[in-house]
Amino acid sequence: QRMTLADDVKLDDFVMTKDDLSGADVKAICTEAGMLALRERRMKVIQADFKKARDKVLYKKNSGSPEGLYL
């Protein structure tokens, strides 16, 4: 599915950051941003959705262990 982006979205800002994002991380950020927009019943994804999604994905990535995994 394609996401409809608001006019204020600048994807280059997220792709070019130095957060060592893999392709899977970028996909996770885009998916999470879309889900945030849907939860707020919006048809367009805004820049704030991408910022929240990036923070969430990087937090999970840097936490170390996968969610739900018992060691």
Image (spheres, rainbow, N blue to C red):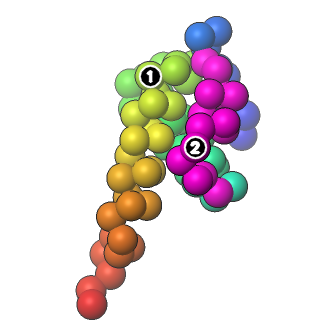
| Mark 1, residue position | 48
Label 2 crowd bin: few (<14), some (14–19), many (20+), radius 10 Å: few
**What residue type is disc 1 on?**
Ala
The x, y position of residue 24, in whole percent, is: 63, 58
Magenta part of the chain: 9-22
Residue farthest front in this picture = 18
The circle drawn on residue 18 is 2
Main SS category, magenta section: loop
User: Mark 1 or 2, which is nearer the eye?
Assistant: 2
Residue 11 lies in the magenta stretch = yes
Kindly identify the residue that appears in the image at 39 percent across and 61 percent down. 62
Vertical comparison of 20 with 41: above or below = below
Between residue 51 and residue 44, name the one nearer to us: 51
Vertical comparison of 13 with 1: above or below = above
Between residue 27 and residue 58, name the one nearer to us: 58
Residue farthest top in this picture = 7
The circle drawn on residue 61 is none
